[in-house]
Image: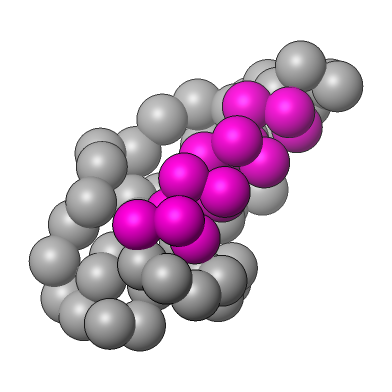
């Protein structure tokens, strides 16, 4: 399993879905550009890492 998180950094940023070998884990969601938004993204990153058993690539 090769986890990947697609991140589109624009005004009102929104990460793309996480992918596990071409299977979508979750739909896209919006992350605000402040400390709470960064914390939410990091928690999502950790969730993907735990499920996949390895750190996801963020592209």
Question: In the picture shown, does residue 9 fall above or below 4?
Answer: above
Snapshot colouring: one colour
Q: Position of residue 45 (x, y in %)?
A: 56, 50
Quick one: quadrant of the N terminus?
bottom left
Image quadrant in which you'd find residue 32: top right
The C terminus lies in which quarter of the figure?
bottom right
Which SS type dominates the magenta stretch?
Answer: helix
Q: Is residue 6 visible?
A: no
Residue sitting nearer the eye, 19 or 7: 19
Q: Is residue 32 magenta?
A: no
The quarter holding residue 38 reads top right
Q: Is residue 10 above or below residue 2?
A: above
| Range drawn in magenta | 38-51
Which residue is located at x 35 percent, y 83 percent? 2
Residue 31, picture quadrant? top right
Q: Position of residue 33 (x, y in %)?
A: 78, 26
Residue drawn 16% across and 76% down? 22
**Image location (x, y in percent) of residue 20:** 25, 70
Q: Left or right of 35: which side holds 43?
A: left
Residue extending farthest top: 36
Q: Is residue 45 left or right of residue 25?
A: right
Residue in the image at 36% along x and 67% along y: 52
- Residue 52 versus residue 8 in the image, above or below: below
Whether residue 44 is in magenta: the answer is yes
**Residue 32 visible:** yes
Left or right: 52 in relation to 10: left
The residue at the point 46 percent across, 45 percent down is 47
Q: Position of residue 50 (x, y in %)?
A: 45, 56
């Amino acid at each position: 399993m090769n986890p990947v998180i697609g991140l589109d950094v624009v005004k009102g940023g929104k990460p793309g879905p996480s992918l596990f070998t071409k299977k979508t884990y979750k739909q896209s969601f919006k992350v605000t550009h402040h400390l709470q938004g960064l914390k939410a993204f990091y928690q999502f990153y950790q969730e993907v890492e735990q499920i996949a058993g390895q750190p996801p690539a963020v592209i």
